[in-house]
């Protein structure tokens, strides 16, 4: 069964839509990779993937996001706004877990 994720996020004053599938899950490394198959990012970038990796250190859970993308030329912007979106998403998830406990 293929899992589909659809979300939108603002970048440079525009709302962008991303449609992704799970490309891989590595339970040993506690990581999951999402690959865009349709959406605004593929109109501007040649490749677009996001990997979420979880790690535990002492009594803390750590989150690492890796964004892989290829700009077709120097005029295509970096994905700073997307990184800000992912940081906000991570904080919201953390706040939710803190409130549950």
Image (spheres, rainbow, N blue to C red):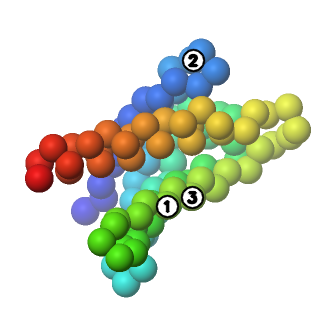
Extreme residue toward the bottom, this view:
28
Residue visible at 64% across and 21% down in the picture: 12
Residues under numbered marks 2 and 3 in contact, where contact means CB atoms less than 8 Å apart:
no
Residue 87 vertical placement versus 24 (above, below):
above
Q: Along the polypeptide, which appears first: circle 2 or circle 1?
A: 2
Residue 1 vertical placement versus 97 (above, below):
below
Extreme residue toward the front, this view:
58
Q: Along the polypeptide, which appears first: circle 2 or circle 3?
A: 2
Q: In this image, 74 relative to 6: left or right?
A: right
Task: Give the SS element for disc 3.
Answer: strand
Q: Which residue is mark 1?
A: 64
Give the image location of residue 83, x and y in percent.
Answer: 57, 42
Q: Which residue is mark 2?
A: 14
- Residue 66: mark in rendering: 3
Q: How many residues crowd mark 2 within 10 Å: few (<14), some (14–19), many (20+)?
A: few
> How far apart are labels 1 and 3 at the CA level?
7 Å
Give the image location of residue 42, x and y in percent.
Answer: 61, 40
Q: In this image, 88 relative to 100: left or right?
A: right
Task: Give the SS element for disc 1.
Answer: strand
- Which callout, 2 or 1, points to the residue nearer the camera? 1
Q: In this image, 7 relative to 42: left or right?
A: left
Question: Quadrant location of residue 22?
Answer: bottom left
Residues under numbered marks 1 and 3 in contact, where contact means CB atoms less than 8 Å apart:
yes
Task: Give the SS element for disc 2.
Answer: strand
């Amino acid at each position: 069964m293929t899992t589909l994720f659809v979300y939108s996020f603002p970048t440079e004053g525009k709302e962008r839509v991303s449609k992704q599938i799970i490309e891989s899950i590595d339970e040993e490394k506690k990581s999951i990779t999402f690959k865009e198959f349709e959406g605004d990012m593929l109109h501007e970038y040649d490749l677009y993937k996001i990997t979420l990796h979880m790690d535990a250190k002492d009594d803390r859970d750590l989150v690492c996001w890796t964004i892989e993308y290829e700009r077709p030329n120097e005029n295509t912007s970096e994905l700073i706004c997307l990184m800000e979106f992912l940081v906000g998403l991570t904080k919201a998830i953390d706040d939710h877990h803190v409130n549950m406990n």
